[in-house]
Image: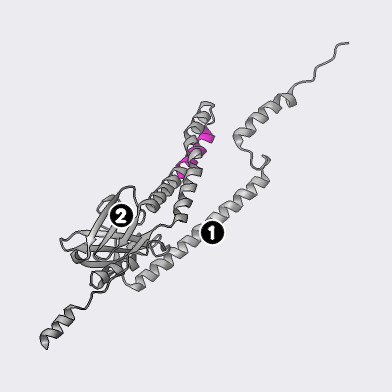
Amino acid sequence: MTQAAAIGADAVPETKHERTVYAASGGRKTFFSFVFLILLPFFASLPAMMYMRLKHGLFFDAIGLGIMATAFTILMFLVFVELLFSLRTRIELGETSVKMTLPTGRGPTPMLFYKSYEIPYDQVHTVETRREIYGGSLVPMLLKGARIITKDEKSIPIGYVSEANVDPCFPYTEIAKKIADRARLPLIDRGNVRRSFRRKFFGIKGSRVNEVDLVDEAQIADLNKSHHNVVMGLVGALVVLIVIGIVDDFASETPIGQTASAALPTASKLAPTATAPAKTQKK
C-alpha cells in the first residue's frame, strides 16, 4: 500500500509554467527610432554651423551655439541609449531556464554594451531584490534592483528601475518573483541600502558612504521631503529668471527675438546716413 502511494506521488505531474517574454513594445521602438532620425540631421549640421560662426568672427554666437550643442549632444546620447535598450533588451521565462539579453552597464541608465545569458532554474541559488539610495539630501535617487545569484556564485543583475518612473515593459520586481517561483525559491528582499554614485558608475571608491549601512523608511521619507523642497526652490528660481528676461526684453530698445550680432550690422548701416552732413547745392 505504501509503495503504491509513493508511486502515485511520483506520478503527479509538475506544474508547467507558460512561456513569458518581456520586451519593449513596437510603439516604443518606433517612437525612439523616429525621434532619433528626426534629430540626427540637425545634430550632424552643428559642426558646420559652429565653423561658419567662427569663420565670420561671430564669437559670441559661437559660444551660445557651443552651449546648445553640448546640451544637444547629451540629449542625442540619451535618445540613442534608450533606442538601443528598446531594441535589444529581452527577458524570456521558459519552462526550464530563463534567457536574458541585458545591458552590461550598471545603474539606472543602460549603457551601450549587452550580454546574453541562459540560466537553468536548477542552477539558481537565490533571487534578491533591494532598494538602492544614491546622492544626499539635495538630489536623492531611489532605485529598485533585482539580481540572480547562481550556484557557482555568479551575480547577474536583472535590472534597475527608478521608483519615480516605473517601466511597464520591464517590471523587474515582478520578473524576479516569477524567476524565484519557477526555481522554487523564496524571493529575498535585502531592504534599503545606501550606495555611492561615484563607485557605482565610475568605479571610484569614496569614504563618505558606507554601503553596508541600512536605511529605514523614516530616513527615506526625510530624503524625499528634502528633495521636494530643493526641486520646488529650483523651479521657483527658474520662473523668476524667465520673468526677469521677459521684462528686460520689453524694456530694451532692441526688438524681441533680434540678437546682438544681427542688430550691429543694421546699426552700422544706419549710422552713416544719420550722421552724414547734407550736401550743399552749388548755384
| Horizontal and vertical percent position of residue 51 | 49, 29
Q: Are marks 2 and 1 in contact (CB under 8 Å)?
A: no
Task: Compare residues 95 and 197 and report the one nearer the observer.
Answer: 95
Q: Is residue 251 left or right of residue 197?
A: right
Q: At 24% across and 53% down in the image, what residue appears?
A: 205
Residue 192 seen in render: no
Query: Secondary structure under badge 2?
Result: strand
Above/below status of 87 relative to 144: above
Q: Position of residue 118 (x, y in %)?
A: 24, 57
SS for callout 1: helix
Q: Which residue is mark 1?
A: 236
Report the side of 25 relative to 143 (left or right). Answer: right
Tell me: residue 43, above or below residue 179.
above
Mark 2, residue position: 101
Residue 156 in the image: above or below residue 11: above
Residue 234, position in %: x, y? 49, 57
Lower sequence index among marks 2 and 1 = 2
10 Å crowding of disc 2: few (<14), some (14-19), many (20+): some
Residue furthest to the right in view is 283
**Residue bounds of the magenta highlight:** 59-71
Q: Amino acid at mark 1?
A: Gly
Q: Quadrant of the C terminus?
A: top right
